[in-house]
Amino acid sequence: MINNKIQKTFEYIDGITIDDSLLLKSVTDILDAGLKSTWKQEERKSFNLDEQYNIKTSVYDQFEVQPEVVKAIAEQLSFNIHPDHVRYQVLRAGIPKHTDAKRYGIINYIINAGGDNVVTKWYDSDDNVIETRVVEEKKWYKMKTDIDHTIEGMTSDRLMLSISLI
Ligand SMILES: [Fe+2]
């Protein structure tokens, strides 16, 4: 069972698995499954990500996750989650340095890394890089999101399952 504590900037975790065949592998597949984008236009503006949202090209998006996937994940957590806190997360073309608005951390699983050398960096309050990681696909991990972080080096869509810790 996985708890909701974040003890390190980044760590791979054991004790949670997902059947890969349950997961959708692209934005096209997500849309074809009838799952909806959940990232609001106001939030896009506050992060200066997109002037004009386009579901096919937006640099950041979140989508609903199939109920059976949410259920399979929830059974492996020692805390309660609302289904809204499990999302497919899509990143394109890198993401500017930011601190997440509402979540102190995440439990994530990368379905497609979006390139061979996609780097996640975390910064301290003086703007020094404190940790750098090329996170591997298909491994569960926890990371801190209440300090500045960036993701750089994507050459294609980066698709993840993301559980928000709030
Ligand atoms: Fe973030």
Image (cartoon, rainbow, N blue to C red):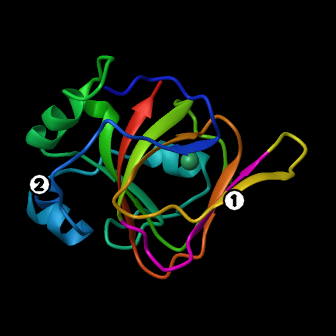
- The answer to whether residue 96 of the structure is visible from this angle is no
Q: Secondary structure at mark 1?
A: strand
Q: Secondary structure at mark 2?
A: helix
Is 121 one of the magenta-colored residues? Answer: yes
Amino acid tagged 2: Leu
Provide residue 72's location: percent of width, then percent of height.
Answer: 15, 36
Distance in Å between CA atoms under marks 2 and 1: 30 Å
What range is drawn magenta here? 112-123
- Which comes before the other along the chain, label 2 or label 1? 2
Provide residue 68's location: percent of width, then percent of height.
Answer: 8, 40
Q: Residues within 10 Å of mark 2 (few under 14, many from 20)?
A: few
Classify residue 104 by image quadrant: top right
Mark 2: C-beta under 8 Å from nearest atom of ligand 1: no
Which mark, residue 22? 2
Work out which residue is located at the far top of the displayed protein and give it. Answer: 79
Residue at x 39% of width, y 56% of height: 61
Provide residue 29's location: percent of width, then percent of height.
Answer: 15, 67
Q: Nearer the viewer, residue 110 or 27?
A: 110
Q: Which residue is identified by label 1?
A: 132
Amino acid tagged 1: Thr
Q: Is residue 28 above or below residue 86?
A: below
Q: Nearer the viewer, residue 38 or 155?
A: 155
Q: Is residue 65 above or below residue 93?
A: above
Classify residue 31 by image quadrant: bottom left
Provide residue 136's location: percent of width, then percent of height.
Answer: 45, 63
Residue at x 59% of width, y 39% of height: 145
